[in-house]
Image (spheres, rainbow, N blue to C red):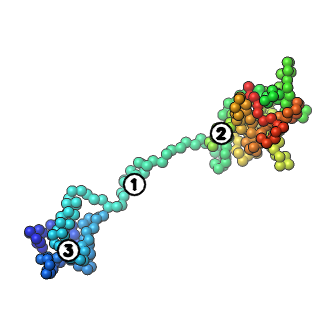
Amino acid sequence: MMCESGFDLRQALDSCDDLDSLEFEMDSQSPLKCAAVMNRPHCDLYEGVKLEVSLQAHNMRQVAHLIIAMQRMKNTQRLQGTEFSDQELLNIMMENVIEESVVMTVQDQVDSGAVVYTSTSQEVKCNVADQYQKSLVLNEEALELQAMTLQGGSFQRRVQLNLSMYVTPSYSSGKGQPVTLGIVDTNLYLSCSSENGMPILQLEEVGDKLRLKHISAEDDLSRFLFLKRGTGLSMTTFESARYQGWFISTALQEREPVEMCTKQEANRITSFRVK
């Protein structure tokens, strides 16, 4: 049909499904009015955009301007639907790559939910004395360490300790360096176990040191692990990894056993010089 100024609506609506859905009628206020048939309220120009023709009559020039604008949009750019293609989805995922993190596998046989400590094979041989210069001496009969002040030629009685370093994926420097403490030239290691509900310090002989290569926090071997932490002024503490809050300590008196204690015990010394 032709409308005002010879404008052909069929040219503007060439993508409509049914041009016969539009009909025109005369009224007293306007030469032409455009109304939609009740069973076809809109016209699909292309996927994603719909032209809806109101049931209320409008000026024909307004309708023509709207149709011309929609036609120009169709001719000047290609509008896409709201759905994403497979390639578009792939591009979105590639542009938002999840940050990669590297986790060191320490032992396949150990439950991934458990914290595992792995030996670095790095050992440090050192002398240990408390803040009052009492050295550690091995009492072979009682199989325990004692703290006493040594002078002159008696220094040869003091024991040296091998500090073996460990790492773990969840390691935090604030908690201290995990270590095992072995007596040099022996198979004896310090351990912290529980007796009658109280943590105690013991010396244990370890025949196969490879057993200590990987230690799970949930394993009984965790009794051999201590957290070495600097406290300032070149002092160091050794906290049990298994019974946190309990520390290796010496008594104020001479020739007393080295034992475990909490920080609250004023009559025990928990700070050591490690050389």
Residue type (three-letter) at the residue carrying disc 2: Gly
Task: Tell me the residue that label 3 is attached to.
Answer: 58
Discs 3/2, front: 3
Question: How far from the left and from the top, in percent, is residue 135?
Answer: 82, 27
Visible residue check, residue 38:
yes
Q: Which mark is residue 89?
A: 1
Secondary structure type for disc 1: helix
Discs 1/2, front: 2
Discs 1/3, front: 3
Residue type (three-letter) at the residue carrying disc 3: His
* Residue at the spot 83% in from the left edge and 22% down from the top edge: 155
Q: Earlier in the sequence, mark 1 or mark 3?
A: 3
Secondary structure type for disc 2: helix
Residue type (three-letter) at the residue carrying disc 1: Leu
* Residue at the spot 18% in from the left edge and 75% down from the top edge: 34
Spatial CA span between label 1 and label 3: 43 Å
Instruction: Please give left or right for residue 94 compared with residue 260 in the image.
Output: left
* Residue at the spot 40% in from the left edge and 52% down from the top edge: 92
Task: Tell me the residue that label 2 is attached to.
Answer: 174
Question: How far from the left and from the top, in percent, is residue 220?
Answer: 76, 45
